Image: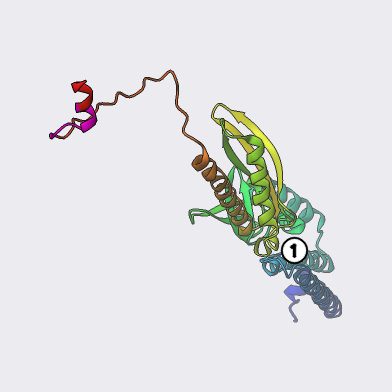
Amino acid sequence: MDLPNPVSTLHILPDADRLMEMGMRVAFTIAIAFLVLELTYLLIGRLETWMSLAGRERPGTGQRARTLGQTMRNVAKTVVWAVVLIRVLDIFGWNIAPILAGAGIVGVALGFGAQTLVRDLIAGFFILIENQYGVGDWIEVSGAEAQVEEVTLRHTRLRNFNGYVLYVPNGELKTVTNRSRGWNRLTVDVPIGATEDVASALEVCRKAADGMSSDPHWRARMLEPIEVWGVESITGSGVQVRLVLRTPPGPEAEAAARELRLRCHEALAGAAAPARVAEPARSDPAAPRPSVIPTNPAPGPAPESNLREEHT
């Protein structure tokens, strides 16, 4: 007496023909998934190359392109294999509606539990996509200036003037001031004493600014000639004369501002020195005159004129 096959009795597995058909459909689905991934990776690679060539003059463009490319690859891989898993379950006859509903509930729970992480990832993605700042840029965050060393989806690594390394989550970056884009405008305020001639001081500063603007060494580091705006403020000790220069971003901007301060100081000092030398000493008529004490005459015979006068 032949015993029934327990596998056939329990209907755990389909028959051979049905199983072969399901296997072929699964293999075809996986092959299509690999093909889609390869095409997606090819497009992402072309996008990385285009981004690197478009920003080859800026430091950190390659790192930004690689970060974006790796992020898009991970997203594409996750989406494709999730679709493949759902399709395979459907091929085997599983009811995927409860699975999708359960996955939605789990996703909502994870979203509430890890909302800070999700916020950081989304913020980092838009920072990279919009190119708000990159490696090497000087930015200001919450009033503190620092240089960007690394940008990822999760955080931004900064290094401040003292050399301290700062790790800032991207979701915490509310307002960022980028000091390394386009151009910088710097102001140089020159103090003038209350007793000095302001018009002459303005003319001296204007000549110093014109001399620096015409200097070939500094002319290449500025975008336009230096402007003398005039008196900016008045205080009890004097006035402030403001000069403005526009330069490309970077350390050259501060160097140009320091050079302008030095030239204005030397020009004002050189203009004031001859005036002090040529100015005559003024005596106050109301001031008491110093008493002159005559010196005692040397002992000896009196002059002949004096003797004659006494004899007469």
The residue at 64%/60% (across/down) is: 152
User: Along the line of sight, which residue is nearer the eye, 260 or 110?
Assistant: 260
Answer above or below: position of 111 versus 280: below
In the picture as drawn, the residue positioned furthest to the top comes out as 286
How many numbered dots are placed on residues in this image?
1
Question: Range of the magenta residues?
Answer: 299-307
Residue 136, given in percent of the width and then of the height, sits at 63, 61
Q: Nearer the viewer, residue 281 or 106?
A: 281
Q: Is residue 178 visible?
A: no
Residue 115: in magenta span: no
Q: Residue at x 56, y 51 (%)?
A: 262
Residue wearing tag 1: 75
- 302 within the magenta span: yes
Q: In this picture, is 156 found above or below 288?
A: below
Q: Amino acid at mark 1?
A: Val
Q: How is the image coloured?
A: rainbow
- In the image, taking residue 290 as reference, residue 225 lies left or right, namely right
From the top left corner, tell me how far across and down residue 1 is, in percent.
75, 81
Q: Residue at x 52, y 53 (%)?
A: 161
Provide residue 33's location: percent of width, then percent of height.
81, 73
Decide: is 271 above or below 27. above
Which quadrant would the C terminus be assigned to in this image? top left
Q: Residues within 10 Å of mark 1 (few under 14, many from 20)?
A: few
Taking the view exactly as shown, the residue that stands out farthest to the front is 312
Answer whether residue 47 is visible to the viewer in this image: yes
Instruction: Label 1: state its secondary structure.
Output: helix
Picture coordinates of residue 300 (x, y %)?
A: 13, 35
